Image (cartoon, helix red, strand yellow):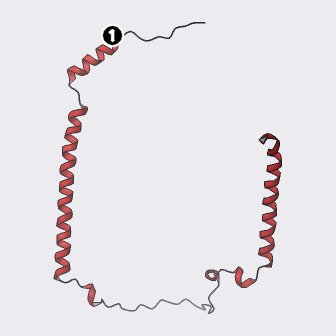
Amino acid sequence: MFNDLAPTLIVLFLAACVLWLIWSALRRLFRSPKRAQDPSLTPDPEPIVGRQEPTVQPVSAPAQAIPDAADVLALKAAIDNLARQVAALEKRLASAQTSLQAVQVPPAGKAAERLSELFEAPPVVPDRRV
């Protein structure tokens, strides 16, 4: 059923695409110039005749920019807290690393026994039936 409708659906889709392209071209053609222009792309009303150097105004520091003792103590406490968290995380990672190494590294004797067991087993070969 879908195979019978596929060419018709493709033609209808292509026709809709062409109609949409024509419609958008006509809208763009008859659009008013004020709405067509993006305000960020409009040129400056005053043309620059020569090169102008920007003026630099000295910026004075506001009164809040200088930290007081409470801010310094709060910052010190936050840094100490962060250092404690990092130390605890390093400790946990170090203990997890040693436990991982203990689990992953089998003793040398067991590895040799396991390899000898694997090589002693007969290979599995599928039957060749016709």
Residue bearing the label numbered 1: 120
Quarter placement of the C terminus: top right
Q: Position of residue 26 (x, y in %)?
A: 81, 72
Number of numbered discs visible in the structure rendering: 1
Left or right of 38, for residue 92: left
Residue at 23% across, 33% down = 103
For residue 61, side relative to residue 36 (left or right): left
To which quarter of the image does residue 46 belong? bottom right
Which residue does the image show at 80% across and 78% down from the upper left?
30
13 in relation to 124, above or below: below
Would you identify the image quadrant in which residue 58 lies? bottom left
Q: Answer with the quarter of the image where residue 12 lies.
A: bottom right
Residue 90 placed where, x, y %? 20, 52
The quadrant of the image that shows the N terminus is top right
Report the front residue among 104 and 59.
104
Instruction: Decide: few, some or many residues near mark 1? Use Cα within 10 Å; few <14, some 14-19, many ≥20.
Output: few
Relative image position of residue 17 (x, y in whole percent): 78, 59
Compared to residue 65, the image places residue 81 above or below, namely above
Amino acid type at mark 1: Glu
Residue 51 x %, y % = 55, 89
- In the picture, measured across the screen, residue 26 lies left or right of residue 116, that is right
Q: Secondary structure at mark 1?
A: helix
Q: Residue at x 22, y 83 (%)?
A: 67
Q: Residue sitting at 19 percent across and 75 percent down?
A: 74
Relative to 100, residue 116 above or below: above
